[in-house]
Image: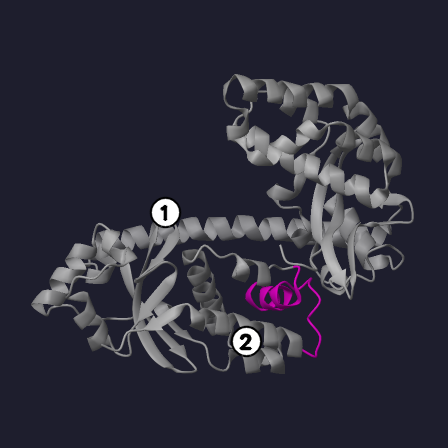
């Protein structure tokens, strides 16, 4: 979640589950702000995502219209306003959570829910909520995680948290309920949003059906042809070709439990100026992360006996130069396939380094993320991005430069 985001959230309240928008802290000049969708003393909540989408598209008088990401949110399809799982907060269920055992999921959910309640209390200036946190400093133990509640002292601490919630939670809920309002929404706009949600759901079902059919066909073809798999497919490791502004490089990558692992170490990817240089390197013993992969020994053996061929398939060729300029020119100028591959490469490299910077930069609620999402996930119901795209191009260029700092050229 990047600075300047607006995030759809769901709140479980006394009158049911309501969806709204939350703008985490963002900076405007020297001032720092945080807000929810609402106006004056009211926090707006809607019974459905369709109503939320309709309101966003038709209302221009609320506390978020001046937020830097408001135009992005207003241009999203209704399906993109569905709150993600980590942004669903069941306020009604808090006493039940606190009454249960302090397992990792319970502690994490309770901490996240109370954090959101604190945000609401601060933004809406709710005395009962502010007093709740000020009167019960024991709640500050939650960020320590489940380990804080081990042993007798930990159990007593957990009981104190439960007692605090049992005593004052009703007042907290009453205070929040008192400021939540559901404004009327244009019926036609709601109908449009509902149609978008239905179409999105049907597309998901169709895609799943198509995937199952493709799997069936693929299985039949494999059974019928009984073709031998390539060496690289058998070992589960892929040669990768990367074209940067400085040159063309080769390396290896695999996935372990869906997590990318490159030829490299400590988040740095080792690359080579030619296939031959890569093969020579693989023939010798080196300390790198791929050496821990169970099938890597087969790769090294083939490199030693000279039978190893570095064969890069099209889906593992990444061409980075020109994308930033194309993004600046506009959607029609962008090679969507190459953009998709570049996003994959940047994301894999960041995940390999345990860095969420790429995920944050490409979040759909950021200008660049929205632009990229528009190109990679076309939706006829989504408003097309409008120029200029200089800022998005600069942000993409920054991602490209950050990726290039993650690679280390081996010239031996």
Specify whether residue 268 is painted magenta: no
- Inspect the magenta stretch and tell me whether residue 376 lies in it: yes
Q: Is residue 18 visible?
A: no
The residue positioned 43% from the left and 60% from the top of the image is 348
Left or right: residue 68 versus residue 255 is right
Identify residue for label 1. 257
Q: Which labelled disc corresponds to residue 397?
A: 2
Q: Quadrant of residue 385?
A: bottom right
Point out residue 130 in the picture as x, y percentages from the top left corner.
Answer: 81, 35
Residue 312 in percent (x, y) is at 29, 71
Identify the secondary structure beneath mark 1: loop
Above or below, 156 against 313 in this view is: above
Q: Earlier in the sequence, mark 2 or mark 1?
A: 1
Q: Is residue 411 visible?
A: yes
Q: Position of residue 8 (x, y in %)?
A: 70, 49
**Quadrant showing the N terminus:** bottom right
Q: In the image, which residues are magenta? A: 365-389
Asked if residue 212 is positioned above or below residue 377 in the image, the reply reads above
Task: Using the image as rendered, state which of residue 383 and residue 364 is in the foreground.
Answer: 364
Q: Nearer the viewer, residue 125 or 253?
A: 125
Task: Please give the name of the residue rendered at 52% of the width and 56% of the height, measured from the top-left corner.
Answer: 356
Q: Residue at left 66%, top 23%?
A: 161
Is residue 125 placed above or below 387 in the rendered structure? above
Q: Is residue 388 left or right of residue 40?
A: left
Q: Nearer the viewer, residue 399 or 234?
A: 399
């Amino acid at each position: 979640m990047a600075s300047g985001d607006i995030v759809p959230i769901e709140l479980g309240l006394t009158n049911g589950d309501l969806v709204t928008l939350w703008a985490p802290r963002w900076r405007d000049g020297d001032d720092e702000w945080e807000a929810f969708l609402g106006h004056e003393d009211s926090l707006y909540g809607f019974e459905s995502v369709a109503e939320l989408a309709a309101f966003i598209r038709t209302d221009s008088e609320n506390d978020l219209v001046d937020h830097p990401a408001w135009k992005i949110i207003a241009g999203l399809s209704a399906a993109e306003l569905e709150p993600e799982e980590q942004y669903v907060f069941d306020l009604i269920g808090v006493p039940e959570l606190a009454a249960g055992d302090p397992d990792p999921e319970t502690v994490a959910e309770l901490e996240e829910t109370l954090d959101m309640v604190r945000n609401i209390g601060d933004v809406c200036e709710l005395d009962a909520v502010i007093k709740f946190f000020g009167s019960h400093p024991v709640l500050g133990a939650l960020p320590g995680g489940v380990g804080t509640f081990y042993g007798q002292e930990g159990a007593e601490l957990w009981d104190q948290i439960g007692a605090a919630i049992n005593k004052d939670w009703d007042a907290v809920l009453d205070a929040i309920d008192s400021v939540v309002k559901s404004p009327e929404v244009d019926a036609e706009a709601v109908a449009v949003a509902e149609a978008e949600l239905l179409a999105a759901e049907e597309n998901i079902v169709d895609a799943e059906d198509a995937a199952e059919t493709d799997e069936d066909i693929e299985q039949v073809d494999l059974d019928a042809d009984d073709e031998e798999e390539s060496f690289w497919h058998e070992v589960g490791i892929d040669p990768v070709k990367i074209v940067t502004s400085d040159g063309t490089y080769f390396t290896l990558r695999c996935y372990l439990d869906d997590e990318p692992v490159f030829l490299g170490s400590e988040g740095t990817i080792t690359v080579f100026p030619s296939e031959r240089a890569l093969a020579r390197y693989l023939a010798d013993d080196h300390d790198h992360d791929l050496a821990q992969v169970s099938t890597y020994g087969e790769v090294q053996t083939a490199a030693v006996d000279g039978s190893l061929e570095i064969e890069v398939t099209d889906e593992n060729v990444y061409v980075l130069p020109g994308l930033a300029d194309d993004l600046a020119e506009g959607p029609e100028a962008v090679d969507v396939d190459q953009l998709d591959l570049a996003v994959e490469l940047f994301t894999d490299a960041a995940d390999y380094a345990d860095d969420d910077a790429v995920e944050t930069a490409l979040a759909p609620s950021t200008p660049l993320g929205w632009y990229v999402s528009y190109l990679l996930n076309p939706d006829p119901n989504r408003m097309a991005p409008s120029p200029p795209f200089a800022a998005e191009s600069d942000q993409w260029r920054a991602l490209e430069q950050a990726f290039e700092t993650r690679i280390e050229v081996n010239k031996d």
